Amino acid sequence: MIDLEGLASLRTSLEADGYEIDVEEGERVAVVISATPAACAECLVPASLMVPMLEHALKVPGDRIDLTYPADHEQ
Amino acid sequence: MGSSIMDPTGQTTRAEGALQPAIRPESLKGMTVGLLDNGKQNAGRFVEELGKVLVERYGVGRVVLRKKPVATVDAPAQLLDDLHHAAELVVIGVGDCGSCSAAAIADGIALERLGTPTAVVCTESFTATADAMAVIRGAAGYRHATVAHPMAGLPFEKVRARAEGVADEVASLLTGATVRRGAA
């Protein structure tokens, strides 16, 4: 089970930069980060760095996380 | 036993115990403090005012100012090496976005590895980002100082107030016997 307190802390950080985070947990953990109109493009860490951050915050092994980033939405 | 985490530079670091913090002085009196402006809006003004407070309140001998070329990525090794040689202690500010907070923590840890006690200041919104970056860089529990969010857009008086408000915490980080959170 994901760490909800860690998720809340990470959500606070992302929202300060204009991003939203949605998490769905099943056999795997699906994380979708999306940009609001106020998003600061250069403020979001690269996806390669976000995965270990999610691993730390959610207390979930990185190989269970499926991350969708704003750039992925636009494709 | 700590878990291993792959960081984006390709290094695998242990999540616990990898960082040996730099040895702290007992006081700041007469010390040379490096101020690293990370280039974010108001960061230069903030670290300069913080430097003045450290001189006034703690007897810091002098300050030297440097500026990062890009806030959102790690500082160039040459810049950190320059700070390591120019100053006995370093203050880095201000992490007030996700990527710049992560980079500021990375810079602080890199300076600690060089042997320079370093205090990083981030706004409170980015505590989760900063703490996660510390784990990724093998420095779980690496403490940083926090100020209210945001820093950008503030008038000078409020920037000065932020500096005055966080100075004691910064001084504690620079002089503490350890930088490990929750250490016994």
Image (cartoon, grey):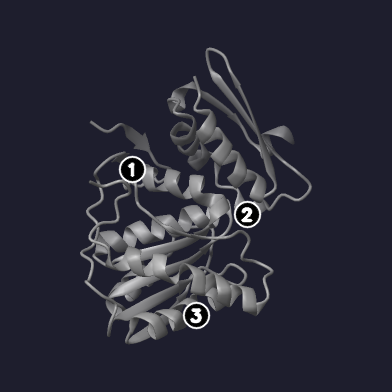
Q: Are marks 2 and 1 in contact (CB under 8 Å)?
A: no
Residue A75 in view in this figure: no
**Vertical order, A31 against A12 (above or below):** above
Q: Which of marks 2 and 1 is in front?
A: 2
Q: Which residue is drawn at 61% across and 39% down?
A: A11
Q: Name the residue under label 1.
A: B11
Residue type at numbered disc 1: Gln
Question: What is the chain identity of the residue bearing mark 1?
Answer: B
Q: Residue A20 carries which label?
A: none
**Vertical order, B10 against B42 (above or below):** above
Q: Of all residues shown, which one is farthest toward the top?
A: A27
Label 3 and label 1: CA atoms lie apart by: 34 Å
Mark 1, secondary structure of its residue: loop
Q: Mark 2 points at which residue?
A: A42
Q: Residue at x 67, y 71 (%)?
A: B154
Label 2 and label 3: CA atoms lie apart by: 25 Å
Q: Residue at x 26, y 75 (%)?
A: B27
Residue B99 in view in this figure: yes
Q: Mark 3 points at which residue?
A: B48
Residue type at numbered disc 2: Glu
Q: Position of residue B7 (x, y in %)?
A: 40, 41
Are labels 2 and 1 assigned to the same chain? no
